Image (cartoon, rainbow, N blue to C red):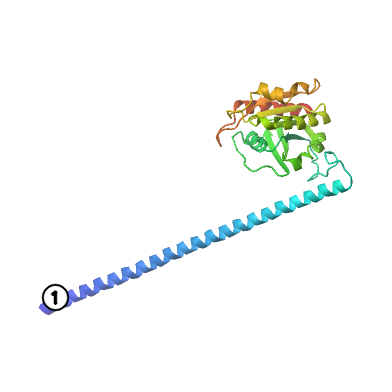
Amino acid sequence: MERGKVKKKEKEKETQKETIREEGREEKVKRKEVEQKIKQKEKEKQEKQERRKRKEEKDEKRTKQGKETEKKQFKGQEEKGENKDSTLTRTPLEPLEKNKQILVLGLDGAGKTSVLHSLASNRVQHSVAPTQGFHAVCINTEDGQMEFLEIGGSEPFRSYWETYLSKGLLLIFVVDSANHSRLPEAKKYLHQLIAANPVLPLVVFANKQDLEAAYHITDIHEALALSEVGNDRKMFLFGTHLTKNGSEIPSTMQDAKDLIAQLAADVQ
């Protein structure tokens, strides 16, 4: 009897040891699986970073090539004796569109792209990167579509503005209401545009009205000399601002959108 009990206890101990060994093996397998998953995630993260880096390098190279091409174009025109300030003899960066579009122009930093994206989605969408070249957007309305064409506002791209006036249904000109020092510059370009096309409807966005330093729309009207645009032209001035990303656009922007749709329909 005693011998049988001893054997039973030994068997139980052996069973316990085997269970412990089995649990240890399972733990090692699980630990190995976790380590493999961690390694896989690290590998995927590294590959993602490498892809992003390659994309950034590719984009940077493309931008650099575009700037070099543009410089060569400008240099070639100057060598031919073209007037440096001429805006009608420059070759466009891309072909003229077949359909007439609503032009969105203004100095760099005025907020053109943010305004355009917000009008398209009816939600505030801020844009940080400046437009390099052209940016086309279609906005759906109850009666169809409106085609908008934004052209970059930095100095190299302003030379293309007048080229597209003949293809415009109307002109939206955006100014930074809080940047007082650049209003004379904005006025200069605006009056060049309206002089080149005496009847094109004009909608001015006095943007960034939410900033403390922003001029009131009456001050913007005076600073841009909008009283001089001519009696034969339809002209409207809106005070606009964009606040929190994702929020609904202000009522003034919705009113402006409705008016633009009406003006475009009247012109077409």
Q: Helix or strand or loop: what does disc 1 sit on?
A: helix
Q: Position of residue 204 (x, y in %)?
A: 70, 28
Q: Would you identify the image quadrant in which residue 89 lies?
A: top right
Q: Is residue 148 left or right of residue 27?
A: right
Q: Quadrant of the N terminus?
A: bottom left
Label 1: few (<14), some or many (≥20) within 10 Å?
A: few
Residue at point 68% right, 31% down? Answer: 181
1 horizontally vs 209: left or right? left
Regarding residue 182, the answer to whether it shows in the image is yes
Number of labels in the image equals 1
- Considering the image in quadrants, where does the C terminus appear? top right
Give the residue furthest to the front: 181
Q: Residue furthest left?
A: 1
Q: Is residue 129 left or right of residue 87?
A: left
Residue placed at 89% from the left, 45% from the top? 81
In the image, residue 180 lies at what x, y percent?
66, 30
In the foreground, 12 or 268: 268
Q: Is residue 1 visible?
A: no
At 53% across and 59% down in the image, what residue appears? 45
Which of 185 and 142 lies nearest the eye of the viewer? 185
Q: Is 117 situated above or below 261?
A: below
In this orientation, which residue lies closer to the viewer: 77 or 137?
77
Residue 128, given in percent of the width and then of the height, sits at 62, 41
Name the spot of residue 114 as percent of width and height, x first: 64, 37
- Residue beneath label 1, please? 5
Please identify the residue farthest to the bottom as the structure is shown. 3
Residue 179 sits in quarter: top right
> Which residue type carries mark 1?
Lys
